[in-house]
Amino acid sequence: MQSSGSSWFEYILIHYRWVLVIFFLLPASLIYDIYYYTRSWIIFKLSSAPHHHGRRVQEVQRQVCEWNKSSQDVPMCTARPGWQTISFREGAYKKTFFKVAINMVDILEIDTIKKTVRCEPLVTMGQLTHTLIELGWTIPVVPEMDDLTVGGLVMGTGIETTSHKVGLFQHICVAYELVVADGSVVTCSQTENSELFYSVPWSYGTLGFLTAVEIKIIPAERFVRVEYQPCHSLDTLVKTFTEETKKTEGNQFVEGLMYTLQSGVVMTGTMCTSAEPGKVNEIGRWFKPWFFKHVETYLTGDVRGVEYIPLRDYYHRHTRSIFWEIQDIIPFGNNMVFRYLLGWLVPPKVSLLKLTQGQVVKELYEKNHFIQDMLVPLSDMKKSLNVFEKEVKIYPVWLCPFRLPANPGMLHPLNEKEALFVDIGTYGVPKVDNFEPVETTRRIEEYVRKVKGEQ
């Protein structure tokens, strides 16, 4: 039986964590960002990254060869601590594996003739968009969170509201460079070592250590013209979302946010060079409402709307609120006073949140939190949303469509024909009485397998 003192301690850690976040983690996150972006800017301007890259690759090779000379009784993994990843969870395997340090954080080359950017695996989306957009370029798929890394998006998966047109993050990559288990360096593409090229995505580092990625780039425009369509029934939302996703013209971006099972907003967008007077919304400014709260106003007001969001603000629209997770960390964070006074410090680094959470908070978080992205066929969207309502009842729900081409590799349509899927993202505290983290997750996974989806 838990002691009263222990219960009170846990209560304070959970309900007053915002004190630690505001007075310690937010300033620490700001200092880190200033250092990181200044360093990246200087190195890029001096063009020194390509000269250092070869030496860094050799250092990875040296460590792999050292493992080969050992007993090889444990597998290898990157030495990057679990708390530094963007995921809210930490893997225990790194405590026992042979760790290989991979300190590769730079953009190596932007080739406007080939229309590609070559970068190291720890380059973040925030770093990449900041550099490219200044030069008039962007990548076709930009997952929302600033701290998501190229390597994580390749080895795992990356999706964005353009994915219904161009596919997942892996589908905009044209070449990978890896150090494999024998210590050699291998480059792969559609035409060179193609079997390895198609096997790398979703492999989670099991085939080699990623050391560089070459990614497609496209011209960037100044704004995204966003149209908001409120929906007041599940049928209407599914119909609207499906129709907008399947349009062949326009709609470079399609996204949905559901606030209940019967209400949500479907958003469509297209890049453009100019905006209508009075309709520009710089949603990335520190004093602006969190994006998901802003979207909800179109639902409560029951009005369609159009506005123009600066491109980089649109790409990272969910960063400041970590989608909507930050409302559980700083409950008053969207208050106007807080936004104006301290909004420029938000968000705290997820890595620092993990580093300082402590064992009690970690255990309570794992027992009472649910973060899952389930990829299901678009045709099963309505049925899937009903399953999530029954099992977890977490809102908002993020909806993002994507095209899955019939390419070789870990993830491909079962009938070998291109298909449309939807990512149903649920992040937060379940509102059902019978939530059990393991059992609930297993039931949802079983359903996703049944409809030939992926997790």
Image: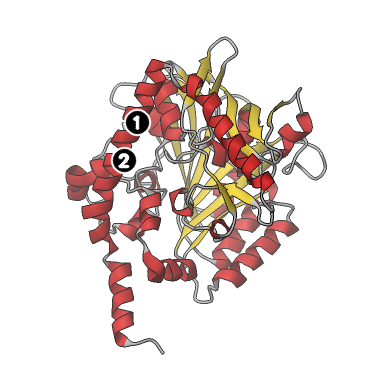
* Residue 147: percent from left, percent from top: 43, 41
Is residue 216 among the parts visible in the rendering? yes
Is 380 rendered above or below residue 213?
Answer: below
Q: Horizontally, is 228 left or right of 10 in the view?
A: right
* On-image quarter of the N terminus: bottom left
- Horizontal and vertical percent position of residue 154: 60, 38
> Residue 273's image quarter?
top left
- Secondary structure under the numbered disc 1 in the rendered image: helix
Gap in angstroms between the C-alphas marked 2 and 1: 9 Å
Residue that carries the numbered disc 1 in the rendered image: 37
In the rendered image, the vertical position of residue 255 relative to residue 26, given as above or below: above
**Tag 1 or tag 2, which sits nearer the N-term?**
2
In this rendering, does residue 159 appear at all?
A: no
| Amino acid on which disc 2 is placed | Tyr
- Residue 113, given in percent of the width and then of the height, sits at 57, 9
Above or below for 163 versus 258: above
What residue is pinned by disc 2?
Answer: 32
Residue at figure coordinates x 78%, y 33% from the top left: 195
Residue at far top of view: 113
User: Secondary structure under badge 2?
Assistant: helix
Tally of numbered tags:
2
Q: Residue 211, relative to residue 432: is it above or below?
A: above
Q: Position of residue 427 (x, y in %)?
A: 48, 56
Q: Which residue is drawn at 64% across and 63% down?
A: 444
Residue 442 falls in which quadrant of the image? bottom right
Q: Which residue lies furthest to the bottom in this view?
A: 1
Amino acid at pointer 1: Tyr
**Residue drawn at 61 percent across, 63 percent down:** 387
